[in-house]
Image (cartoon, rainbow, N blue to C red):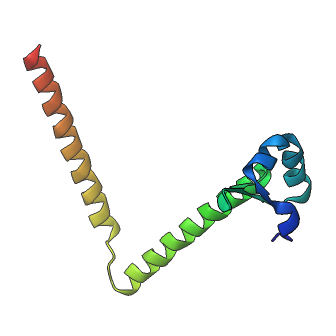
Amino acid sequence: MYNFKANEDILPLSEFRSNLAGYITQTRETGRPIIVTQNGRTAGVFVNASTWDEIQEKLEKMEAYEDLLVAEGEADRGEVMSMEDFEKEIRARRDREDRKAKSKTSKIRAAV
């Protein structure tokens, strides 16, 4: 991950604000995040754009993996649906949505 340096990477908000451009360069060059404090407490974490993108990609992969684990558990417990039943369920949902949309349209026409 990152070699965090407490003496360089934890800053009070006032110092961070006074040299923002320099700290942007620092995070870009080192890849390390900066922890910003306010009144002695952590107020935020500043990371460069590429690190942010990496974090987002990893989160998406983790969420997909969690979905797979849930699906695997459901399959292990026999909580599955045949493709035929799935298609019937999708058609039924579409039919309900179509009826709702037609009903709304009829109500709007009647009101006009």
Q: Residue at x 87, y 62 (%)?
A: 8
**The one of 103 and 92 positioned closer to us in this rendering:** 103
Q: Residue at x 38, y 79 (%)?
A: 74
Locate residue 60, reporting x and y percent: 60, 61
Locate residue 16, reporting x and y percent: 79, 48
Q: Residue furthest left?
A: 110
Q: Residue at x 31, y 72 (%)?
A: 81
Locate residue 104, reporting x and y percent: 16, 30
Q: Quadrant of the rendered structure where residue 31 is?
A: bottom right
Q: Is residue 56 above or below residue 1?
A: above
Q: Residue furthest front?
A: 39
**The one of 35 and 77 positioned closer to us in this rendering:** 35
Query: Where's the C terminus, which quadrant?
Result: top left
Q: Residue furthest right?
A: 29
Q: Quadrant of the rendered structure where residue 22 is?
A: top right
Q: How many marks?
A: 0
Horizontally, residue 72 falls left or right of residue 35, namely left
Q: Residue furthest bottom?
A: 76
**The one of 8 and 64 positioned closer to us in this rendering:** 8
Locate residue 82, reporting x and y percent: 32, 71
Query: Where's the N terminus, which quadrant?
Result: bottom right
Horizontally, residue 39 falls left or right of residue 86, namely right
Horizontally, residue 87 falls left or right of residue 95, namely right
